[in-house]
């Protein structure tokens, strides 16, 4: 059986893909179908006789929230927000993790010549960060990366890139992830969709880097890679044409599980009070707001909870299906 | 061997230092003014400046950093009942002092706050780890031994649900059922008496345990399926060993090696403070301390909790590395 056939016959993958598809459709069509504005309060029809938000009804399909806004409209808009955050953050973290993992794994046991200018710029970036100028530090780091990409010319120093990168990963892994996320989140005055996804993306690539590195370590010893090197192909070409395709499978698995993790992390951030600034709805934010109305208006908690659970389950199942289909032993 | 150990120790110390330094930078980059927060929003600029000078926050960052490091571990008079004013915020053993300064918000020594919180987090982490280990190993082994049956499929489905449900949802659900409806267990908090501590730990430990048990079940199942196909297991079966004996003695024992690694690292993570679970259950451990500190911009407490977390994580991964040769003869031979 081919991989594709194995994947399509996988029961878990079928269920997961259906769930994901349904959620994407909901995110695309939901806000169009919704009969209310997600940010608009309706204090006249949204309250019942006891001044509590009304439950699910013909007017409010999934009930009203504490500010008498339509839950369905908010969940639909929240679907767009949550999915965009999860997908883009995954793209960011997977790209970063794969790049670091490949760079480290491919250069393991060797010393890479790094231009002196790049080293100096990186040191400058650290100093700028310490001096409280994060924006300048970021641009210095960007310039350093550019010098690394462009440069064989000029003086350079031999650096054990693998050791350097992996030790950096060690340090960041010892750092409490949620504290880091919250601290960075607190550093931005108002938390927008972009800040949340950048924070999540920049803090969750460590595991990916480790796994990709270990895969690259075995791939780079295979005959065709050694042959390509012997034939004098350039490193970027080898990485792109020979190494990347052979680690793409594990990366795909990590990415789909990571989407699930991102949805969870976003909701955890919101739960801890460091999420999106109001009034933008996201599932995590809605769950957080619904918590206090648990006994009086349970739909405010269950509706977002169900969506979070369904999406996490869906992406996990897709990841599982991919893993089983790519595993030659199954 | 000794050289490897020395290198490993030096590296661990470096990781702790780098992590704390990173935390120092991050907590100083945050756009906030501790002096303003202490003096109050209505305070006169003069008073804010006075507080700033008192805290030493008017000095350049590198001076603050070196002060922090020098104070962190220093030699002083033995800590007894009457401690001199200058060492009021110190903890430690004998003449060796550890000083993390004073919390901006709580006005207490950070060392004291951490030594209050650490045992509670340890209690929660140990209970949760025990729970998830017992449940995970048992159900993972059964599922692998009965592979393909209804039992196995059911276990796989349930554990997938287990790792997909956010922990705070499990927490809220447990609170609702056992504290709100049935009134069997306390809703949250830590309690006052030892008995209350025990009844209070059940719900948060179960919350952590459900996720962990699901995770370990999958891990043990995958590992066991692999192992049950190996030659030595088939040989043992062929020589007439009972099914149970084969599963437990020949397969499970080998599956425990990778499991120990994961458990130790997870335990380290839990000791750093299960932030979400501690928040849901208002468990006054390291996680709650850290979250509160970040939300309050309480620099010294942030640094203190990052330091403890980093040490715990590093020590656990060191322990795993050292324990590996003891558990697995193949590693020892190399």
Image: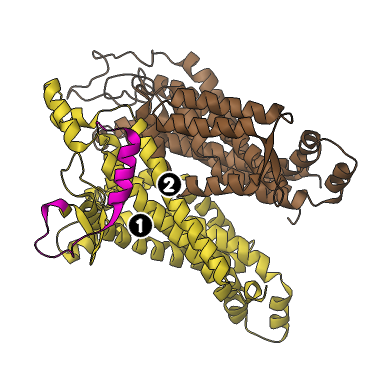
Chain colours: A brown, B yellow
Q: Does the magenta stretch include residue B79?
A: yes
Given the current orientation, which residue lies at the most extreme bottom position? B240
Please tell me which residue lies in front, B294 or A104: A104
Please tell me which residue lies in front, A156 or B17: A156
Q: Is residue A291 magenta?
A: no
Residue B275: image location, x then y, percent: 35, 46
Mark 1 surroundings within 10 Å by alpha-carbon count, few (fewer than 14), some (14 through 19), many (20 or more): many
The nearer-to-camera label among 2 and 1 is 2
Residue B328: image location, x then y, percent: 60, 73
- At x 80%, y 52%, the residue is A221
Magenta-highlighted residues: B58-86
Labels 2 and 1 in the same subunit: yes
- Seen in the picture, residue A58 relative to B175 is either above or below; the reply is above
- Seen in the picture, residue B174 relative to B42 is either above or below; the reply is below
Q: Which residue is denoted by mark 1 in the rendering?
A: B206
Question: Residue B19's mark?
Answer: 2
Q: Can residue B265 be seen in this view?
A: yes
């Amino acid at each position: 059986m081919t991989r594709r056939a194995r994947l399509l016959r996988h029961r878990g993958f079928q269920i997961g893909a259906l769930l994901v598809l349904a959620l994407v459709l909901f995110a695309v069509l939901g806000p169009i179908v919704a009969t209310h504005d997600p940010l608009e309060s309706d204090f006249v029809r949204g309250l019942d006789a006891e001044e509590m938000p009304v439950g699910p009804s013909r007017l409010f399909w999934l009930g009203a929230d504490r500010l008498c806004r339509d839950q369905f409209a908010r969940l639909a808009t929240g679907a767009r927000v949550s999915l965009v955050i999860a997908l883009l953050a995954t793209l960011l973290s997977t790209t970063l993790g794969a790049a670091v993992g490949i760079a480290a794994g491919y250069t393991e046991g060797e010393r890479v010549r790094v231009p002196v200018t790049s080293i100096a710029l990186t040191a400058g970036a650290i100093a700028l960060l310490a001096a409280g100028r994060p924006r300048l530090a970021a641009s210095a780091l960007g310039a350093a990366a550019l010098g690394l990409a462009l440069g064989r010319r000029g003086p350079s120093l031999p650096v054990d890139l693998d050791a350097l990168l992996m030790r950096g990963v060690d340090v960041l892994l010892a750092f409490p992830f949620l504290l880091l996320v919250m601290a960075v989140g607190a550093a931005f005055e108002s938390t927008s969709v972009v800040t949340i996804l950048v924070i999540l993306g920049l803090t969750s690539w460590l595991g990916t880097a480790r796994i990709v590195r270990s895969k690259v370590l075995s791939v780079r010893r295979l005959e065709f890679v050694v042959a390509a090197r012997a034939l004098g192909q350039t490193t970027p070409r080898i990485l792109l044409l020979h190494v990347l395709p052979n680690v793409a499978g594990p990366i795909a698995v990590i990415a789909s599980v990571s989407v699930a993790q991102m949805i969870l992390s976003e909701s955890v951030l919101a739960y801890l009070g460091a999420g999106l600034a109001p009034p933008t709805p996201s599932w995590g934010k809605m769950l957080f707001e619904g918590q206090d109305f648990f006994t009086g208006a349970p739909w405010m908690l269950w509706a977002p909870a169900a969506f979070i659970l369904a999406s996490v389950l869906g992406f996990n199942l897709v990841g599982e299906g991919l893993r089983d289909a790519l595993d030659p032993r199954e | 061997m000794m050289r490897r150990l020395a290198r490993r120790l030096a590296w661990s110390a470096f990781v702790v230092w780098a992590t704390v330094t990173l935390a120092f930078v991050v907590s100083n980059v945050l756009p906030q003014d501790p002096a303003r927060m202490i003096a109050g929003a209505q305070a006169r600029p003069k008073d804010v400046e006075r507080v700033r000078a008192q805290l030493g926050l008017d000095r350049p960052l590198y001076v603050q950093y070196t002060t922090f490091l020098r104070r962190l571990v220093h030699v002083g008079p033995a800590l007894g009942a009457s401690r001199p004013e200058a060492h009021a915020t110190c903890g430690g053993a004998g003449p060796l002092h550890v000083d993390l300064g004073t919390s901006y918000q709580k006005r207490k020594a950070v060392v004291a706050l951490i030594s209050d919180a650490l045992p509670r987090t340890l209690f929660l982490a140990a209970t949760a780890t025990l729970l998830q280990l017992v449940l995970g190993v048992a159900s993972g082994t059964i599922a692998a031994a009965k592979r393909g049956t209804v039992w196995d499929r059911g276990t796989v489905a349930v554990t997938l649900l287990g790792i997909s449900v956010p922990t705070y949802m499990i927490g809220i659900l447990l609170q609702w059922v056992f504290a709100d409806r049935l009134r069997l267990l306390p809703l949250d908090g830590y309690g006052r008496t030892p008995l209350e501590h025990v009844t209070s730990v059940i719900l948060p430990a179960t919350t952590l345990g459900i996720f962990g048990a699901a995770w370990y079940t999958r891990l043990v199942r995958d590992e066991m399926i692999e192992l049950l196909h190996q030659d030595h297991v088939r040989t043992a079966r062929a020589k007439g060993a009972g099914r149970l004996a084969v599963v437990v003695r020949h397969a499970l024992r080998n599956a425990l090696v990778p499991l120990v690694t994961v458990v130790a690292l997870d335990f380290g993570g839990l000791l750093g403070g299960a932030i979400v679970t501690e928040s849901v259950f208002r468990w006054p451990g390291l996680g709650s301390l850290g979250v509160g500190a970040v939300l309050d911009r309480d620099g010294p407490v942030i640094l203190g909790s990052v330091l403890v977390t980093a040490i715990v994580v590093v020590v656990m991964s060191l322990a795993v590395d050292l324990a590996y040769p003891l558990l697995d003869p193949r590693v020892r031979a190399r």
